[in-house]
Image: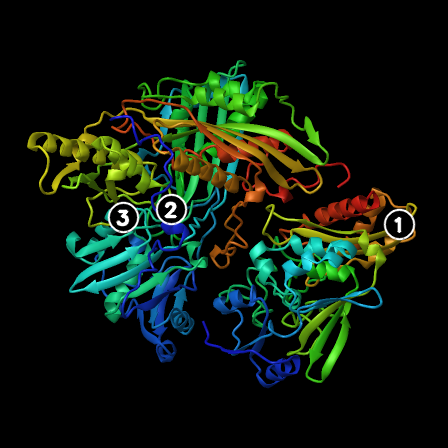
Amino acid sequence: MSAGAVGRAYPRLEGPAKVTGTARYAVEYPVDGVSYGWAVPSAVVRGRITRVDTAQALASPGVLAVLHHGNAPRLTPGPQTELWLLQEPAVHYRGQYVAVVVATSLEAAREGARLVHIDYDTGPHSTVLTDDHPGLYKPDHVNPSYPTDTAEGDFDAGYAAAPVRVDATYRTPAYHNNPMEPHATTAQWRDGRLLVHDSNQGASSVQATLAELFALPAESVRVVAQHVGGGFGSKGYAKAAVVLAALAARHVDRPVKLALTRQQLFGPIGYRTPTIQRVRLAADTDGRLTAICHDAISQTSTIQEFAEQTAVYTRSMYAAPHRRTTHRLVRLDVPTPFWMRAPGECPGAYALESAMDELAVAAGIDPVELRIRNDTDVDPDQGRAFTSRNLVACLREGAQRFGWAGRDPSPRSRRDGRWLIGTGVAGSSYPARSRPSSATATARPDGSFLVQVNATDIGTGARTAMWQVAADALGVPPERVEIRIGDSALPTAPVAGGSMGTSSWSWAVIRAAQALREKLRDGGPPTGEVTAEADTTEEVGGQPALPRYAYGAQFVEVRVDADTGEVRLNRMLGVFAAGRVVNPTTARSQLIGGMTMGLSMALHEEGLLDERYGDWVNHDLATYHITGCADVESIEAYWLDERDDELNPAGVKGIGEIGIVGAAAAVANAVHHATGVRVRELPIRLDKLIGLSDLA
Amino acid sequence: MKAFRYHRPANVAEAVAVLAAEPQAAYLGGGTNLVDLMKLGVQRPDVLVDVTRLPLDTVEELPDGGLRIGATVRNSDLAAHPVVRRAYPVLARALLAAASGQLRNMATTGGNLLQRTRCVYFQDTGKACNKREPGSGCAALHGQNRDLAVLDWSEQCVATHPSDLAVALAALDTVVEVHEADGPRDIPIAEFYRSPGTHPERETTVARGALITAVRLPPLPAARRSTYLKVRDRASFAFAAGSVAAVLDLDGDVVRDVRLAYGAVAHRPWRAYRAEEALRGRPFSPELAARAADAELAEARPLRHNGFKLPLTRAITVRALTELASS
């Protein structure tokens, strides 16, 4: 590729439209004759609907219809049991959608929903994850297709023989994705064809799912997702909103808009599973790891297995001769957990990177140095060399920028008035993968180019990044390129998820541009439009299976009020090695966004489940706290120049998730350094630290 | 949500008359709490009587040195008022510690005093709550109750009052001016709020339909040395995990007068009379402040998840008074 647009800090192409309010989100498209759907959640945890009384709702002004299992259009069963909505009387968890009210206004639909009376037969339920739950079992594999357990060497013997050992159990609660835009859909049926404007992370994937559920050929379903107000994984697959809107629109034979409420985001859309993680580390007196074991417990629902890959991070991060990882699950009467930014790696790294800090204390070794000593060029899991691994470079650069040198390792060694000051570090890693994608590139007679790929911009800057990549691949200034994304009518592309969007889409865009240039070279200047297509299925599938990872180092300085236990961050600094950075402006946003989300996980977020009701009671943003700007005074993200030719044509590793990995551990480690208190159950709230001073 | 009518009265008497005639009417101030509760189905008024255009939006200095604050004065305006900032810093600080800039621009003085508890069970019509639905039970008592009361709760209700402003006003011996169907009435703030007892659905001592027209601060020169300390689970935009409003008047190092009120501990803003008694007439020290807080909290009954509120309230009592003593 020619030097040019990639690497330059272009502002987002859609920025002006967003800040002036003209960018349209899923339920903002004007539609003639539109009606409004309101999803009705079940009021019981586990049971069976015995009667649905819709009379009062139907008599309410403006109400057009009430859909439920008794009258809703039939769906074709598929692998996503969570989407098998309004098809049967069974209730599998509290909050499962059991009806939809459609009305001529949003308010009328909401009032109608209140007037739907549903009777249930109920049974006993179990909704709380414990490490001695009788339902603990070993899944066949963990997400997406990793072995459930791994073992190398003899962990028990290695652990028993070591002079320095750590055995600690860490707990994380349920975390709930709260994108600014909720899951929302405008659905329209025309001549047996379905058009949805939907808030999701991948219109091609949603198109395929809808086609399957409604037994339609894919070309009869069109999914448009031009602008998406965040997803963080929760929109990585079709979810209830789009299915309910499509069912309702078919039932009333009118367009339907349906958006979930903030309260409804706590449960049925999925959430990060709570975890219970035991980590055992053993080392020699120089801090070289000899044995590593990570046992992770998490939950799934009774209707669909979701086996989060919590301990997979530990398989490749640090080397040791004796290693073991295990995953166990419990099926609870809860909504199915789902993806949340760095599923698996994020909670797993919290546990391992916390345990590494405990090991550093136990061994009397600086925690940066401990990680450097346990670096490895060869993936301990695959036994092959990493295509690139710049963990140590990130740690060194971060330590230098942060001012780590000379740190007194003793807890409670720094104080500023009533504040106890501490610093912490953690490593970070996330796989760099690619999926097959397709794209087209078109030359127009006026000298401009059109590049099309069904990428999704969930606020990340993906549209702008693809535009930059396309310009360089075409060898023209970006001003001559038009980029189109966010529509299943465009060439099929994978979801914006798993930090694979940019690598996958850019691969197809580059190949399409190269093919177009070939065509143009052969044919001379075009008189009409010339289009070239690319599909990377074969090329991506044929890529050798090498260990490809991005790395990072997270540094945090906290202050803890010695009287009240309040924790605030003075600063947070991350250094990342993630291949080539396409756009420094949007990359920085991704990285500090991930770091902020990790800080939020460390200090604030916690789904509080009430076992009697079987759901999370703090289901709004006033009671489920997300970090605010005032909680951290400075966040800085840096990255290293990194070239890795074994990745993909653009040389990118993806940056959507690496920023959150390790962040919570760095905060927890800093809190320990400040206070001497090791909080092993997140979030680290003031009640776990109160009364550190003598006169409280 | 339930359809409602909207009425904009020409004067206070008309507003009160509408409420008297309409059993399901509610006053609308900034709407920052009521509108949310209407969407959730927790409150379902037939009529909203918008009082924000009534001439109740002024702050008036009184001849006796006190201050009358109109009921529709917005929180932001009140916090920025020069007399409030100078003479009653505790009030300005309490206001600025609350909510967000956007909410403070909307929220009114009267509405703030009447906001409802943020107990999660109250706000969810799918859960038992005696305050929302008398007789349905209190799910919070044995549920997730970290944010709830440690003092003066009943088996029927363990909710806390969420206001910061009300805590400051409690410390200042504020008089609440209300207009009821039979005319105006003054009520000391100490008598304005009720304990939950067996009727947690009744939160104040005024008749249904009464309109707060103003709050009146008595002259209190000592309030120039006053503060509000609020501890939250995050640094901004959160209800209090604990809060204290404090006024301290020292004669040398002896406590001549002191006013203390706590937030986040009870169904109402909690005036800490016992702590005041323990402080008054004695030489000030942080240890004395700690003992005073202990005296106030001696009868506290923490719930399963909120025992931390006792050391927290004690800690902020010590800090607030110590800061005032050394200022």
Q: Amino acid at mark 3?
A: Gly
- Position of B220 compared to A647: left or right? right
Q: Are marks 2 and 3 on the same chain?
A: yes
Residue A260 visible in the displayed image: yes
Q: Which residue is mark 2?
A: A15
Q: Position of residue A38 (x, y in %)?
A: 37, 66
Looking at the rendered structure, the secondary structure element under dot 2 is helix
Gap between marks 2 and 3, in whole Å? 16 Å
Q: Which residue is mark 1?
A: B250
Q: Is residue A344 among what the camera can see?
A: no
The amino acid beneath tag 1 is Leu
Which numbered dot is residue B135?
A: none
**Which-is-in-front pick, marks 2 and 1?**
2
Give the answer, above or below, for where B310 lies relative to A141.
Answer: below
- Residue at the (14%, 38%) spot, across then down: A533
Q: Secondary structure at mark 1?
A: strand
Q: Nearer the viewer, residue A495 or A28?
A: A28
